């Protein structure tokens, strides 16, 4: 079969670009949904992990995990440093990045119709072939009686070395609504959507959309927990996924 | 990237122009780690502004899971807490650094 020289070069270039794009972007991630309200003078140790559950082996048991130390340094600024781990379905767990995350509270809780804040994080990749990234999210919260709704809307942009061909920002929309039954048990619903980047935007089934029940609360005074079980509602998402967060908090 | 930045800034700016509803003022003081007054009656259906003054030389934390509020008050300083509009009922709060110190807001 005759293959024009130019065509094979183009095909190789396209394949290379596709590989680079895949490397620069996390394949699976269920994130913590952040309140815009900073917890001043609170120090906490946190584990946040998630995994997929799917009958197809290429989507089953993808994992993401994070060990974090966070501190509310001022009434409007909280900083977190974390180690991020991940695992593709066929591979072992690996250390992905070291993250420095800042959360800024814009308004006093309840002062305005909507509480607002912003998250700005930098991920320093520990993998030589993966670029660093900057994450920005708008954090919004609204209380209606005993219901609290939080939304995080933002994007992740690869930067620095190896970022040239990784495409534009990767957009995410995360939201939950919980019923504050008491401080120990707060049931709710959570939505996690990775809208993708570039041409994926606007193609629902190329994006990862999850929705499912979640519970939030405190245990034994100093522990906070979150747990959710999600159903993938787009083709790119796994059939189901689970997320858990455990946090030990203290004051300083 | 540029579009995304403009989008974020525009959203943030629109929020900064949100209008604060009027809130009635109430003052709670903390002395010897205890609240005074311990019980406050406020009108239901209205936003409330609580000023919490800590007269002690040690920090305190105004916390209420009923109101979904948690805020540290440094020694010798004060904080503002906005709550409501509240449905009629009782809403407990406590000092998280001295949990025996409690109080109640009654909305009528």
Image: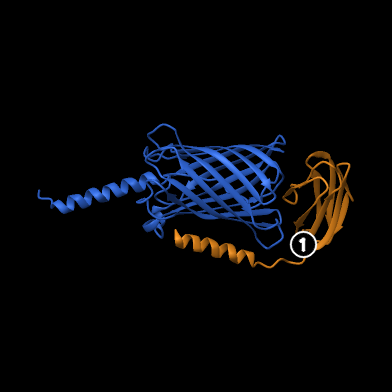
Residue ID at (41%, 31%): A92
Report the chain holding disc 1.
Answer: B
Q: Which quadrant, please, contains the N terminus of chain B?
A: bottom left
Specify the farthest residue to the left: A1
Write down the quadrant of residue A58 in the picture.
Answer: top left
Q: Nearer the viewer, residue B93 or B71?
A: B71
Q: Secondary structure at mark 1?
A: loop
Q: Colour of chain B?
A: orange
Q: Position of residue A22 (x, y in %)?
A: 36, 46
Reading the image, the residue beneath label 1 is: B47
Residue B32 horizontal side relative to residue B80, left or right: right
Q: Quadrant of the C terminus of chain B?
A: bottom right
* Lateral position of residue A26 relative to residue B69, left or right: left
Q: Residue at x 75, y 61 (%)?
A: B85
The answer to whether residue B21 of the structure is visible from this angle is yes
Q: Nearer the viewer, residue A72 or A86?
A: A72
Location of residue A93 in the rendering, given as x and y in whole percent from the top left corner: 44, 32
Q: Residues within 10 Å of mark 1 (few under 14, many from 20)?
A: many
Between residue A155 and residue A102, name the one nearer to us: A102
């Amino acid at each position: 079969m005759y293959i024009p020289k130019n065509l094979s070069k183009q095909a190789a270039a396209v394949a290379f670009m596709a590989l680079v794009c895949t490397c620069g972007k996390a394949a699976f991630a269920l994130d913590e949904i952040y309140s815009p309200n900073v917890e001043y003078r609170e120090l906490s140790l946190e584990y946040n992990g998630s995994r997929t559950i799917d009958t197809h082996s290429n989507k089953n048991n993808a994992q993401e995990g994070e060990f974090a130390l966070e501190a509310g340094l001022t009434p409007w600024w909280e900083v977190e440093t974390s180690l991020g781990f991940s695992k593709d379905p066929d591979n072992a767990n690996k250390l992905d990045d070291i993250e420095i995350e800042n959360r800024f509270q814009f308004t006093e809780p309840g002062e305005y119709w909507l509480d607002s804040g912003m998250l700005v994080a930098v991920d320093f990749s520990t993998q030589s072939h993966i670029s660093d990234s900057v994450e920005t999210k708008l954090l919004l919260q609204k209380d209606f009686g005993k219901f609290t709704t939080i939304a995080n809307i933002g994007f992740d942009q690869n930067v620095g070395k190896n970022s040239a061909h990784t495409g534009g920002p990767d957009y995410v929309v995360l939201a939950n609504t919980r019923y504050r039954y008491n401080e120990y048990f707060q049931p709710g619903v959570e939505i996690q959507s990775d809208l993708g980047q570039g041409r994926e935007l606007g193609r629902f089934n190329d994006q990862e959309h999850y929705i499912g029940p979640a519970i939030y609360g405190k245990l034994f005074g100093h522990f906070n927990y979150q747990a959710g079980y999600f159903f993938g509602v787009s083709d790119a998402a796994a059939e189901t996924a689970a997320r858990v967060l455990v946090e030990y908090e203290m004051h300083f | 990237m540029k579009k995304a930045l403009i989008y974020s800034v525009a959203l943030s700016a629109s929020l900064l122009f949100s209008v604060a509803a009027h809130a009635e003022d109430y003052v709670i003081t903390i002395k010897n780690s205890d609240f005074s007054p311990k019980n406050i009656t406020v009108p239901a259906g209205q936003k409330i502004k609580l000023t919490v003054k800590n007269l002690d030389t040690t920090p305190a934390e105004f916390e209420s899971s009923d109101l979904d509020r948690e805020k540290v008050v440094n020694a010798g300083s004060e904080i503002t807490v906005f709550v409501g509009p509240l449905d009629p009922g009782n809403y407990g709060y406590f000092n998280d650094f001295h949990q025996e110190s409690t109080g109640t807001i009654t909305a009528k």
